[in-house]
Image (cartoon, helix red, strand yellow):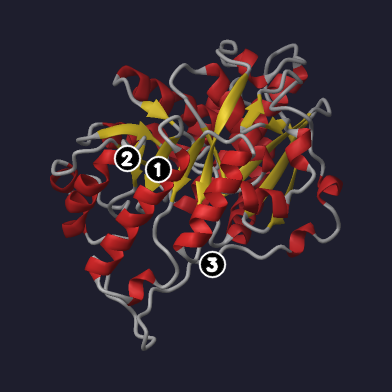
């Protein structure tokens, strides 16, 4: 630390289902932890890290930004797999630096704006009754913000009109159940044709949604403008995007009021904080996308604590409880909120042995193909 350089001694990885956990140990023995998010093929992220390992260990930068910048600009391709790897490394380096100084990560980021953050809890189900049952359970457990996916199983096997009508009916039913004291974000997840987006938003406007998320395919930033201009509700966008450059373009789109970076994909802490600044300059919120594991959740809480425009932290509560049953207590999740840790780094250090011998056997996420009742692939715009 006397010359402030960062020297990486070794790197360890562990894949747990959709989560890629990375431990980076510096030459003074300090270890930091990060998590990458490429849920379709997490093992591919490990392959990238293995490829970068020798180069990372040979660098002697004076800043974490220098490490991130080196790989952002040096590598010919910047795809989702590479960004997930760099995001995990970046988080681990920030975590290690905070642990070196025996301070929470939020302290390095300028201080803590709040001591706890409410959780935005994901709600979905195979049927409308399933959705209402899960929403009721979450509300009874103290959660006061829901992210609703109102498309039931096999919804793509029916007509576009039936899919639209069913989704509207579910949105109305969840609002009736939750009352007006609960924020509800509506996740479209590209499951409506572009022609039906404006009618859908008009019909659910009465529930005053916190946002409508991902109404269009994520790859078409420029062409989304003509679609979003016809939507009368606040839009949330960004879970599959990375770097502050992409998010600056997203923040310029019509009706966008919430950016959704994932710290395990967008470029780690280094890029996440810049995205928050972009959003703040446009009076937009940042609600981190989080569908992976405990490290990403802890990191998102640290980031949310240190910036003023993060109202919630997302969590898929049931999935998290099944995959990481012991970590809800360790991360202090109670009454629908996560307490921001005051311990060094992002919070209690999680070691490979904490996840159990069978952790690596958890299956990765697989996106189902959209097929109709006959089994044929469905054309999607």
Mark 2: secondary structure: helix
Residue topped by disc 2: 207
Front-lying residue, 55 or 283 = 283
Residue topped by disc 3: 366
Q: Looking at the image, can residue 297 be seen?
A: yes
In the image, residue 122 above or below residue 380: above
Q: Do the residues labelled 2 and 1 touch (CB within 8 Å)?
A: yes
The disc label shown at residue 175, or none: 1
First in residue order: circle 3 vs circle 2: 2
Q: Nearer the viewer, mark 3 or mark 1?
A: 1
Q: Position of residue 337 (x, y in %)?
A: 62, 30
Q: Which of marks 3 and 2 is in front?
A: 2
Left or right of 269? Residue 26 is right
Q: Position of residue 94 (x, y in %)?
A: 64, 26
Q: Looking at the image, can residue 261 be seen?
A: no
Q: Position of residue 178 (x, y in %)?
A: 46, 40
Mark 1: secondary structure: helix
Mark 1 crowd level (few <14, some 14–19, many ≥20, 10 Å Cα):
many
Front-lying residue, 214 or 174 = 174
Screen quadrant of the C terminus: bottom left
First in residue order: circle 3 vs circle 1: 1
Label 3 and label 2: CA atoms lie apart by 32 Å
Screen quadrant of the N terminus: top right
First in residue order: circle 2 vs circle 1: 1
Q: Residue furthest bottom?
A: 374
Mark 3: secondary structure: loop
Label 3 and label 1: CA atoms lie apart by 30 Å
């Amino acid at each position: 630390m006397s010359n402030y350089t960062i020297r990486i001694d070794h790197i360890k990885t562990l894949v747990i289902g959709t989560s890629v956990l990375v431990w980076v140990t510096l030459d003074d023995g300090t270890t930091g932890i990060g998590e990458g998010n490429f849920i379709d093929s997490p093992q591919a992220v490990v392959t990238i890290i293995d490829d970068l390992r020798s180069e990372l260990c040979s660098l002697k930068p004076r800043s974490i930004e220098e490490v991130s910048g080196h790989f952002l600009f040096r590598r010919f391709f910047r795809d989702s797999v590479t960004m997930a790897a760099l995001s995990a490394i970046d988080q681990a380096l920030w975590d290690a630096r905070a642990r070196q100084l025996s301070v929470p990560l939020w302290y390095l980021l300028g201080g803590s704006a709040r001591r706890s953050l409410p959780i935005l809890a994901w709600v979905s189900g195979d049927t409308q009754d399933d959705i209402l049952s899960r929403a009721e359970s979450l509300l009874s457990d103290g959660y006061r913000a829901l992210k609703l996916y109102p498309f039931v199983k096999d919804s793509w096997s029916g007509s576009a009109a039936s899919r639209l009508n069913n989704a509207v009916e579910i949105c109305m039913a969840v609002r009736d159940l939750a009352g007006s004291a609960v924020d509800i974000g509506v996740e479209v997840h590209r499951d409506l044709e572009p022609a039906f987006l404006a009618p859908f938003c008009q019909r659910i406007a009465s529930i005053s949604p916190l946002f409508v998320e991902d109404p269009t395919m994520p790859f078409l930033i420029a062409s989304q403008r003509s679609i979003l201009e016809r939507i009368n509700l606040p839009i949330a966008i960004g879970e599959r995007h990375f770097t502050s450059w992409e998010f600056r373009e997203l923040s310029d789109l019509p009706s966008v009021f919430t950016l959704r970076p994932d710290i395990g994909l967008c470029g780690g802490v280094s890029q996440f904080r810049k995205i928050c600044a972009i959003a703040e300059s446009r009076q937009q919120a940042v609600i981190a996308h989080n569908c992976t594991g405990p490290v990403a959740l802890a990191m998102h809480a640290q980031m949310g604590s240190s910036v003023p425009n993060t109202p919630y932290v997302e969590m898929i509560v049931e999935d998290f409880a099944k995959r990481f049953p012991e970590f809800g207590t360790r991360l202090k999740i109670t009454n629908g909120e996560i307490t921001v840790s005051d311990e060094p780094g992002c919070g209690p250090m999680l070691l490979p042995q904490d996840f159990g011998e069978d952790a690596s056997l958890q299956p990765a996420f697989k996106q189902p193909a959209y097929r109709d009742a006959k089994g044929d692939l469905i054309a999607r715009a």
